[in-house]
Amino acid sequence: MSEIETMPQNASKRVFIKTYGCQMNVYDSDRMADALAPHGYMPTQEIGEADLVLLNTCHIREKASEKVFSELGRLKELQGEKRAAGGDMMIGVAGCVAQAEGEEIARRAPVVDLVFGPQAYHRLPDMLARAQSQRHMHPALKKAVIDTDFPEEDKFAHLPAARKEATIARGLTAFLTVQEGCDKFCSFCVVPYTRGAEVSRPVSQVLDEARRLVDAGVKEITLLGQNVNAYHGTDSAGRDIGLGELCYLLAEIPGLERLRYTTSHPRDMDDGLIAAHRDLPLLMPYLHLPVQSGSDRILKAMNRKHTAAEYLSLIERIKAARPDMALSGDFIVGFPGEADQDFEDTLTIIRETGYASAYSFKYSTRPGTPGANLGDQVPEEIKTERLYRLQELVNQQTTAFHASMVGKTLPVLVERVGRMPGQVGGRSPYLQAVHLEGATDLIGAIHQVEIIGTSTNSLVGRLVRSAAA
Ligand code: 5AD
Ligand code: SF4
């Protein structure tokens, strides 16, 4: 595409995108903005000035779809106010709720103009044009444009490259989707149904996008995928490349200083990826490796395909390769049939692993998943109590992990001005927020910072040596 073609034809319109859920949705929202820019839509943070509002929804837990319907109720009022003032606003629902409940959304909320799933983002400009032509119809005849197909064509190949100017505005760190969908079918999870089968992007596409990001000033890339370490892209010679090998290739890009990836499944943590952690200093020592439960019985019912002991021995192998590896995880409490002893086993695996951070959730039934057909539901108050106990343990571990940094000198990628005047902020290799006194010209590079204290969720540092020194 030439420069001219990518210029907005009419840059007077504004799109407001509200993103729910995971980092993949954050990435997808940016790509939607990129796809709309050549059609005259510039992103806005002000919903009141939007000509188009897109809700990029999440379906993973709880009553996510109900949240979407109540948001749509508010948007209907806003649309009414705009129309009364002589303006207008189109409304679209994207993401996993759209994928799971497409027709239902259009039926229950006629205010919606378009509904489209994660596989359809590259067709957004076309859908928008169709929806616009519907707006002049009588309300009784007007129909939302719905696109929730899983197409044969490759979504990634059709997405526009991130615009250079947009990438700069998005900062020093960037997400890069390398894999989408999941074939694991954990019995509690909707992802295999909403995001579809596992698909990996070809190696050359990933490397091209990474180079473009680095050219635009990005220093740290986080590779994204629902099950990112199941990545198996094809290179130009037709070879199958795993995530570990992909990391070695990315490490050769001059100017790329840090690499992360998320989210991984223990079963896909292969020797190649563990070796990459041993060999590549740019691959950051922070790994999100969810185990969900410490009970073999529950792990089996969850269809996680490994035992607690296998997880622990995997952690040992990872730490042998990269001794300072910080671990993060996800836990579900109250999976159907979870007895007191199963929950105690979960606390035990947390103690034995030692987490730098962890996310934990009460089990919630997702329609259409095998878990939805299980009896023996755990009462809500027991889930609440277990979640509380689990989070207390994890919080202790997080606090101890932060405290163990005091006195160490860490490389910190300084990314932004700090909360207080005269401060800047960034991230340690272990993904901890670090604040330090310093001038704004520190922003944009990795500096050596001595950790002198901790606060609730961050570290306090002192500049030891700037990158320029
Ligand atoms: N109930 C509770 N938590 C869930 N997760 C996924 N599905 C459910 C569910 N039905 C959690 C898992 C997963 C994280 C992204 O969300 O812990 O790793
Ligand atoms: Fe869901 Fe399991 Fe796939 Fe993760 S690995 S996306 S929890 S099915």
Image: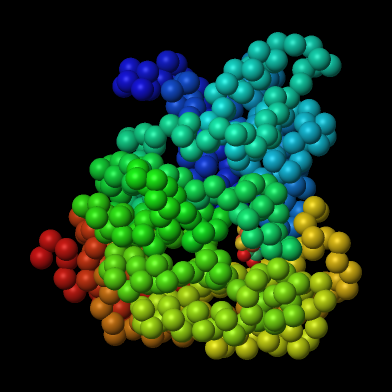
Q: Residue furthest front?
A: 238
Which residue is at a point 82% across and 31% down the rendered structure image? Answer: 107
| Image position of 4 (left or right of 288) | left
Give me the residue at 77% from left, 57% from top: 369
- From the viewer's perspective, is 370 left or right of 439? right
Residue 136 placement (x, y as % from top left): 70, 11
Q: Dividing the image into 4 quarters, which one contains the N terminus?
A: top left
The answer to whether residue 235 is above or below residue 41 is: below
Q: Is residue 47 visible?
A: no
Ligand 2's quadrant: bottom right
Q: How many marks?
A: 0
Q: Look at 33% across and 17% down and name the residue there.
A: 4
Q: Considering depth in this image, is 459 or 282 the residue closer to the camera? A: 282
Residue 9, compared with residue 163, is above or below; it is above
Give how far across and how far down residue 416 sits, in percent.
33, 55
| Quadrant the C terminus occupies | bottom left
Residue 149 seen in the figure: yes
Q: Position of residue 320 (x, y in %)?
A: 38, 83
Instruction: Please state if 81 lies on the left or on the right of 267 as rendered.
Output: right
Viewer-side residue, 260 vs 444: 260
State the image quarter where residue 101 is shown. top right
Residue nearest the viewer, comparing 174 with 312:
312
Q: How is the image coloured?
A: rainbow
Outermost residue toward the left? 469
Residue at 30% over, 55% down: 249
Q: Is residue 399 above or below residue 328?
A: below
